[in-house]
Amino acid sequence: MKPYVYITRKLPEETIKDLTELFDVKMWDHEDIPAPREVILKEAQKASALITMLSDKVDEEVLSGESLKVVANLAVGFDNIDLEAATKRGMIVTNTPDVLTETTADLTFSLLMASARRIVEAAEYIKAGKWGGWSPYLLAGHDVYGKTIGIVGMGKIGEAVARRSKGFGMEILYHNRSRKHDAEKELGAVYSSFENLVAKSDFVVSLAPLTPETRNLFTADVFAKMKKSAIFINAGRGPVVDEQALYDALKNGEIAAAGLDVFEKEPISADHPLLELPNVTAIPHIGSASTETRTTMIKLCGANVKAVLTGDSPMTIVNKEVLQ
Ligand code: GLV
Ligand code: GLV
């Protein structure tokens, strides 16, 4: 019997051809609706491999499948997976780093520019028929060039955002668990304490992964320390932010604006309080969503699954210790 591979979302057939040739592959039927938990639980009991989305909760119960060897997550982040439980069971977890770095940096910088120059608000304004004529301060926003960007979470995506910032003549501060000497040398990025970064930056950009240390990192106190003209961008993970505190800071003018690709609890609905605020640019977790990159990410998940099920080393393993 061929190993059984379950994919929790409908993906284009041609992107998983390598898998369907070798294994018995089944996909959830919908592109936009997540597979219900009962379905994932049932399939995990039969599967040798799962390809999962960042919106799937892959906990100990899912990981209890007897034949399960590998979970390939279609994302660079893997906070949706109980890594400890997987490692304890000797299961391999893989993610999709590197291939999405530049695409996600493009989106992060777009969100920064859109927030600074009020692009979405301006586009809505013109479509609503409000453009009565030119006026000196009509939809006037904030400059980007020459300003200070503070990047919290200086992984590969953070560095790619820093490269873009250098092109805009920005001063670059960053905060990270480890120093990035290359970025310091090549881009003039300056390592900063979190407190100093928050106080000095015109753009505070969070790309931090969700970990126990980063959960709820951006609190009311933190927003209070930012400049009144600061723009907060989050393209990492929603739960690093106290959303109520962010709402209050935006509403009370403690900071100028926010651009958000991620939220505490996704998806958010149209009546989410943050969406009432004109100074919020909100988009639905599309950081790596270019057609090219999503296809590459899917293929990387497939290649990881194929490697594990045929006894090779996966390309992008998260829990290397299971290989020892
Ligand atoms: C997206 O958020 C990812 O982790 O790839
Ligand atoms: C990983 O977290 C990255 O930023 O590439």
Image (cartoon, helix red, strand yellow):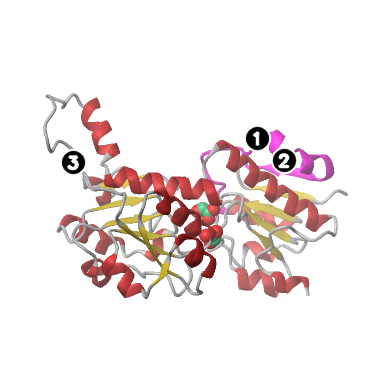
Q: Nearer the viewer, mark 2 or mark 3?
A: 3
Q: Position of residue 284 (x, y in %)?
A: 41, 45
Q: Secondary structure at mark 2?
A: helix
Q: Position of residue 192 (x, y in %)?
A: 38, 73
- Taking the image as shown, residue 292 lies to the left or right of residue 149, namely right
The question of residue 18 being in magenta is answered with yes
Q: Are marks 1 and 2 in contact (CB under 8 Å)?
A: yes
Q: Which mark is residue 140?
A: 3
Residue 192 vs 139, above or below: the answer is below
The residue to which callout 1 is attached is: 12
- For ligand 2, the image quadrant comes to bottom right
- Amino acid tagged 1: Pro
- Which residue occupies the foreground of this view, 88 or 292? 292
Residue 127 location, quadrant = top left
Which image quarter is the C terminus in? bottom right
- Amino acid tagged 2: Ile
Q: Is residue 60 visible?
A: yes
Label 2: few (<14), some (14–19) or many (≥20) C-alpha neighbours in 10 Å: some
Residue 131 location, quadrant = top left
- Taking the image as shown, residue 24 lies to the left or right of residue 149, namely right
The residue to which callout 2 is attached is: 16
Task: Give the residues in magenta.
Answer: 10-37
